[in-house]
Image (cartoon, rainbow, N blue to C red):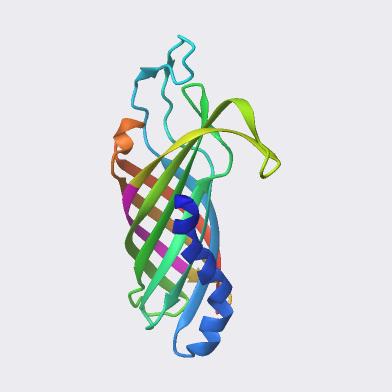
Amino acid sequence: MKLIRAVLPLLVLFLLCPTLASAQPQGRVDAYFGMGSAHDGSSNQFVDLLGTGTFSLTNSMGGVFGTVGGGFMFKSNLGVGAEMSLRFVQGDYAGLGYRPIFYDFNGIWTPSFGTKRVMPEIQVGFGGLSLRFYGGAQNYNPYTGSSSNFVGSYSHFQLHTAFGLRVYVKEHVFVRPQFDYRWVHGLSDQFKSDSVTAYTLAVGYSF
């Protein structure tokens, strides 16, 4: 439920994109999807998460992540936005499967670069991380008719900043390579540090 409440504003933003664009002719609404990776090292601890008496080394964070986001530019170079980034498939973490889900809300600044086709993009904001773990036998839920091997999660507060370069390949279509840095409070309990770096290549559309 905490994750749903956090991501709900992002979903509402996407649903309102066409309405906002038509209602604010001087503004701009952007939506984008990207792929990349996020990285943090191993805590180098041996743990027995399954309670079997066998200890396994904790893994580092990596793998392929997908990112979806959007923003509203209420001035030519200032706006606000939100995004969510998650690992596509479960990774291995000391015998369990894990999936990190980052979500954040940002202020956006696109300083002038002398051309409308190429512009830097800087994001600064805050959000959270839902670090979800899976393993063992699947549990059947009679109310939903589904089964899951979800065993628990950790929730962390995060600060987020990103530096990207937006390149318009057509009037409304852009590509954006981006570097993200996240400071995630308490993540060093599961990984090497509270710092997570990410690299993403996104494709987007400006309304």
Q: Position of residue 17 (x, y in %)?
A: 55, 76
Q: Position of residue 21 (x, y in %)?
A: 53, 83
Is there any visible trace of residue 174 in the rendered image? no
- In the drawing, does residue 72 fall left or right of residue 171? left
- In the drawing, does residue 204 fall left or right of residue 82? right
Q: Main secondary structure of the magenta part?
A: strand
Residue at point 36%, 73% (across, down): 110
Residue at point 49%, 12% (across, down): 52
Residue 123: which quarter of the image? bottom left
Check residue 87 for magenta coloring: no
Up/down of 164 relative to 200, above or below: below
Q: Position of residue 26 (x, y in %)?
A: 44, 89
Give the magenta range. 157-166
Residue at point 56%, 27% (across, down): 135
Q: Position of residue 35 (x, y in %)?
A: 54, 52
Check residue 161 for magenta coloring: yes
Is there any visible trace of residue 4 in the rendered image? yes
Q: Quadrant of the C terminus?
A: bottom right
Give the camera-side residue of 67 and 52.
52
Give the camera-side residue of 111 and 144.
144
Residue 82: which quarter of the image? bottom left
Residue extending farthest to the front is 143
- In the drawing, does residue 131 fall left or right of residue 161? right
Residue extending farthest to the right is 145
Up/down of 31 relative to 25, above or below: above
Residue extending farthest to the top is 53
Up/down of 122 relative to 61, above or below: below
